[in-house]
Image (spheres, rainbow, N blue to C red):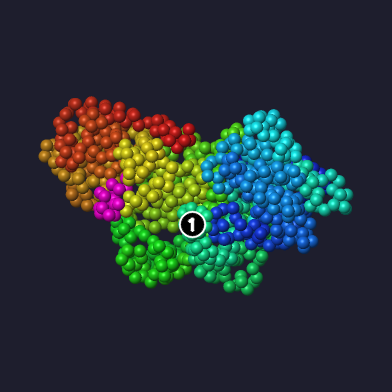
Amino acid sequence: MNYKESFLERINREMSVFNYEQSLRFPGEDTLTIDLHCHDKNSNEPDEIIGRMLNIPETWLPPEELIETLKNHSCDTFTVTNHNNARSCYELQDKGYDILTGAEFSCTVPDYNAKIHVLAYGFNPAQEEKLYKARHDIYRFQRYALDNNIPTIWAHPLYHYEEKEALSLEFFDKMSLIFERFEVINGQRDTWQNLLVKQWVESMGSNTLEKYEKKFGIKSADYCRNPYRRAMYGGSDSHMGIFTGLTGTRLYVKKLKDRLKNESRSSLALQALLDGDSAPFGGYNNTEKMTVSFLDYFCQIVINMKDPGLLRLLLHKGDTKDKLLSFMVINGFAELQRHKLTVNFLTLFHQCLKGDTPGLAKKLMVPKDYREIFNEAVSMADVRNKTPEKMASAFDSSIEKIHKSLFDLMFSRLEAKLKKLDLEGGLSIKSAEEFISTLELPGHVRKLLESKGKVRKNGITSINAPDFLDGLTFPFLASTVIAAANYTSSRVMYKSRPMLNAFSEKLDDLKLPKKMLWMTDTFEDGNGVSMSLRHMLNEIQERNLPVDLLVCSDTVKPEDHLVVVKPAAVFIPSFYREQPIRIPNVIDVHNQFREGEYDRILCSTEGPMGMLAVYLKHAYSVPAYFYVHTDWIAFARTAMNFSDPALNRLRRILRGFYRSFDGVLVLNKEQKKWFSGPDMEFKKTEVKLTSHWVDEKFRKTGAVKSDIFGIGNEKPVMLYVGRISDEKGIFDLPYVYERVKEEFPDIRLVIAGKGPEEERLKEQLPDAKFLGWVEHNTLPDVYSAADLLIMPSRFDTFGNVIVEAFACGCPVVSYSTKGPRDIIENEKSGYLVNTKEKMAECVISHLKKGKEMTAMKDAALARAGEFTADSIIGKLLRDTELL
């Protein structure tokens, strides 16, 4: 078997080679090691509007602690590059430290309305003031820096702030003329993004730059000391101080040892920056470092945050969405601060990330349930102190283990509480309509948490919330903080993914492979949907398509193109016990998406997997589509007997959910019209029509009634195939059967399938033949031996059994509903009716045709031939833009 290198393996290999090549550029004894991009507590005004509204600094790290960490991580030359100020540099210089003055300026590119970050070094306070004023025009900023011998570096060139529209690639062409130094390894950016920058900088030859000079009418010499030379640099971009110094730059200084006798390291570093003699190092990262940094940041917010005040939020710049999000964040962290155990845990976590090991007394006080979590946190302090170069991977592993422990603990306790509540009669919701009608949260969560179990008019709660939440609050809050750090790191890392994809196209290299994750809850449910998914998986495997299915199950085994995550919990709703709700660990799914290198999502269930699909869509900035298998409105109306108010509420919930996706795939024309109409408000181009095909084993066989059903071959047979449940319309069968028997006394009704209403149906059809569950391989014989398939369901979105029957030459009579209406050619390959009376009459009419039935069987076979895997899969790949 030939091994194929994955994209992630490729970029890690290329980064390793690049680091090795850079390490050989200069003699070690003639290099200064410096982290050119790091922050401390004087980075107190975030670029992000939310941070400014909340009045939260980017870090609380003291300058001296930053310098100590840099020394511990093998740096010998130092700078601090806080946002828009060099206060820390001046403070440290006043205390006797040899510090290269630096800052990271937020600059505006006026002709593109873009915000970029520019690192600048070696300026004095008066020059800093000039740079600060000039930063609103990058051209003016760069000219001033050049005139005053202030070297500048474009920090993380592929990550920008507050641009209103996607930047054109022309923007980068122009910027390549005004910068001569580029940060190609940023410790907080992923390997892919860093390599793209590296490849781009390497492509900037003199011919290319001269071409851009003609195109834009500007001269690189007006902004750059060496107009046709481009240099590469690295920096950790660390705010919390954890990974400071692990990414940086080696600066070449000829005869360094001799020059250090008379010159400072900072002055030598400044000259090396001006000359462009540099070699970056570090940069192996996906989201691990950023996740750790955000987790530590959230911990410190809980420890340090003060209420910014409502007036500050209301009067601050920012749109309504920003203010609403800020208000939610304030209340979320306020709830965290109210819970002492959670605050203690997050404080411990922060201390361990700093390398501070808790004392013996604290270890002895840890409750048994939390000991494993505590020990894992302590292990992170050991890693930081002993092997800092392994921190990213070790911390990532520990955080995952801690989250799993918290998540499992939360759901084991929740399961026990729900069972106890059920036994005590506390779970009063007995129907789906009641659940939908009472699905609500109060305007502020504190009201819910303080509820003592009084029944409210709006039905928000009827349980004693404090008692119920006792023991759940800590694992819920702590695991939520970890999940939020994972989400935020991915969101920040990949928010510009469309632009990165376009950039890789521009370079014609490092193109992220197209690969889709198909998420579903119903793979093992034994119904038509699960059978269609099985067919799809078989074709994906055979064709080796860039698609994997992800399911949550304790029983399904992983296969090629089938990824299985274990459920953290399984709940059986009292109002629909046939459908268990399996809840996976969000971090498991998050990691599967990252490690699987997926760049789009298709989801086909509205449960936990549906919510996780929306989570992944926003976390990784990827397109997400929804495959609509079930018409829940029709199901709720016909099978659940929802009232009109409950149906309207369900419709609004579904609209909010479906509108979270970029498009939907539907199985019939009526649904296509509904989704693009006022109820769902999708654009017509966002709604794609798809269908199912049947396995090749479904074809007409020579099976006869006597062998398959044990009845005479001369007797007519009506067949029902499907789940024996009320929503399938099975209780129309007794009327149809009795009416047809009036005309054909020897007619036999054969029922293939199982379900909750089997015994009740047997009572009403004592002389029908019940086959029970029929194996898939046997069904073609069952269809082939029957004269007609009866389909009494009124809400099927497609109707797999119709195509199965057609493929075996068995005509179908069905209600004229949205799915069957798109498949059956009325009175050619089958019949479409509106009532059970008409259904019975069609069966009678059909059986009276005698030999003329052959033509309809042939038409059914021909119609089945139009539903092929090739055409359906090809369209699916085009609709999801995999082709």
How far from the left and from the top, in percent, is residue 43? 64, 57
How far from the left and from the top, in percent, is residue 185? 67, 45
Kind of residue indicated by mark 1: Lys
Q: Left or right of 826: which side holds 367?
A: right
Q: Is residue 647 magenta?
A: yes
Residue 710 shows in this picture: no
Considering the whole magenta stretch, tell me its main secondary structure.
Answer: helix
How far from the left and from the top, in percent, is residue 51? 56, 57
Q: Which residue occupies 68% across, 39% down?
A: 178
Q: Which residue is mark 1?
A: 323
Instruction: Judge by depth and name the residue closer to the eye, 444 or 745.
Output: 444
- Dividing the picture into quadrants, the one containing residue 576 is bottom left
Q: Left or right of 820: which side holds 297?
A: right
- Residue 274 position (above or below residue 323): above
- Dividing the picture into quadrants, the one containing residue 530 is top left
Q: Residues within 10 Å of mark 1 (few under 14, many from 20)?
A: many
Q: Secondary structure at mark 1?
A: helix
Which residues make up the magenta segment?
Answer: 630-648
- Residue 170 position (above or below residue 44): above
Q: Left or right of 41: which side holds 480?
A: left
Q: Left or right of 795: which side holds 533?
A: right
- The residue sitting at the left extreme is 742
Instruction: Judge by depth and name the residue closer to the eye, 31 or 1.
Output: 31
